[in-house]
Image (cartoon, grey):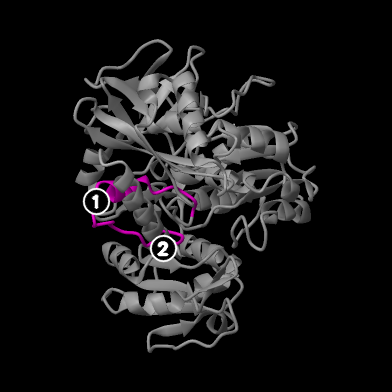
Amino acid sequence: MTCRLANTLKRNGIKKGDRVAIYMSVSPMAVAAMLACARIGAVHTVVFAGFSAESLAGRINDAKCKAVITCNQGIRGGRILELKSTVDEAVKNCSSVKCVFVAQRTDNKIHTCSHDILLEEEMAKESLVCPSEIMESEDMLFMLYTSGSTGKPKGIVHTQAGYLLYAAVTHKHVFDFKQDDIFGCVADIGWITGHSYVVYGPLCNGSTTVLFESTPVYPDPGRYWETVERLKINQFYCAPTALRLLLKYGEEYVKKYDRSSLTTLGSVGEPINHEAWHWYYSVVGEKKCTLVDTWWQTETGGICIAPRPSEEGAEIIPAIAMRPFYGITPVLMDENGKVLEGNDTSGALCIAQPWPGIARTIYEDHQRFVEAYFKAYPGYYFTGDAAYRTKEGYYQLTGRMDDVLNISGHRLGTAEIEDAMDEHPEIPETAVISYPHDIKGEVALAFIVLKDDMADKDMIIKEVKTIVATKIAKYAVPEHIMVVKRLPKTRSGKIMRRLLQRIVTDNSDMGDITTLDDPSVIEEILETCKKYKLKHPTL
């Protein structure tokens, strides 16, 4: 499949160095598209198949893509995604695009344009052999766009040798991968996790890798574990958000399926809270699996901090990433740019030396790359995250630096408050943001989701305040706590706290919300916030 696709690209004028956008949901054809680009030396940029036409066009134009590879439609959680029509709308404003390759994911007929090429039909005409292009170690392998709350998305550039080496080595050692293992990472290929631990890392190691197209709760909340049983998955890697969602449904959907094949469980995307960690370890893994909470970023290319690798039998502390990977030298910095020595201290997490998987630049904007990652602490890579180094010398991620509150001079990560609140048995999900305060500078404002809509909200709020005061301190107790039905999340499961911030501060500009799984959640929370403010005029 890969060679036929590669030959099809070449026949249609795609050559070494050309950029190709891939706008597809998770599928064998999507992976073949990535590998076909790599085979002929073209640079792929996978755009998550939930982005709007405007967002897609922005990425195509920034990368000056010569072609787009897409599907007629996508399927996710029982819903049809109109991928081709989104591409049609996007490429109207993309002069660099010469052709659009369209694969058939469904049997539904779609409108075709003059620049469209029906992929399977053309692939059938091509040879099964396509010689690999010879590449330099620092040639571009792919670029992947990361979006912030402001500014245009950044095209993060990863290169051939360093990235592939790092993805392969971290996959092997963090997950204790062995030949013939079945590796199950349920991330979308539109994100870096899908690149490194669905495609490149596992395939470099000769692993069988699982492609997961659906959602954790379709057709029911047992979908992950049914997949584990059916495919006999050995390592399972998912996001804490998915775990928090699934634990709401209890143990029934987990225990219905045989999970005895599992040896390693992993979490990725954000710090995992204690309740989710213990549920994952005890219920899913039955206390028999190694659980690795991993920290890394799009820019790092692969896992940088995780409990494994380590000495055999070394302890794993729940909900902590713990140990730097080979070659990673983390340091904590204070507000004045001074390296913090010793343990039991918190600061800005930086990395002191380069490693193979580090991104090389932002496409055609190296100055922005330097300013974003190396200007704040000269001589160090600044992760943008805050971390705590424990008394034992392990690393615990406490949230983004812009998610650090300063309450009456006390610096506190929002993740620490969320972690404490999550310990309440009736609260599966929380999100904490900062809110300005005349005296304290800023205070914590929390949104909580309850397992039972009929529960006594006032009693739960009172109890959760006590938990935060006991676990952290009285100053950490959120000034305001709102009960909502659900939180705004991206399709990859990340909570979009910036939207909550804008809702609370009456900022009507929500920014780019195309990655939201369900945009209607904004109206829900706006209504809740409006009612809350009527009862609490100090907000």
User: Where does the magenta region start and end?
Assistant: 492-520
Residue 121 occupies which quadrant of the picture? bottom right
Query: Compared with residue 266, is residue 184 higher up or lower down, i.e. above or below?
Result: below
Say which residue appears at 30% left-offset and 20% top-offset.
410
Q: Secondary structure at mark 2?
A: helix
Query: Compared with residue 346, is residue 7 higher up or lower down, i.e. above or below?
Result: below
Residue kind at label 2, given as amino acid type: Ser
Most foreground residue, 117 or 27:
27
Q: Secondary structure at mark 1?
A: loop
- Label 1: few (<14), some or many (≥20) within 10 Å? few
Q: Which of the numbered marks, if any, corresponds to residue 506?
A: 1
Q: Are marks 1 and 2 in contact (CB under 8 Å)?
A: no
Q: CA distance from mark 1 to mark 2?
A: 17 Å
Is residue 502 covered in magenta?
Answer: yes
Magenta stretch prevailing secondary structure: loop
Does 14 sit left or right of 538 as displayed? right
The residue tagged 2 is: 520
Residue kind at label 1, given as amino acid type: Asp
x and y percent of residue 537 in the render? 26, 42
The quadrant in which the N terminus is found is bottom right
The quadrant in which the C terminus is found is top left
Say which residue appears at 38% left-offset and 43% top-offset.
299
- Label 2: few (<14), some or many (≥20) within 10 Å? few
Query: Compared with residue 465, is residue 457 higher up or lower down, i.e. above or below?
Result: below
Say which residue appears at 26% left-offset and 17% top-offset.
338
x and y percent of residue 208 in the render? 68, 53
Does 371 sit left or right of 526 as displayed? left
First in residue order: circle 1 vs circle 2? 1
Is residue 34 covered in magenta?
Answer: no
x and y percent of residue 318 in the render? 59, 26
Does 499 sit left or right of 489 as displayed? left
Say which residue appears at 73% left-offset and 47% top-offset.
254
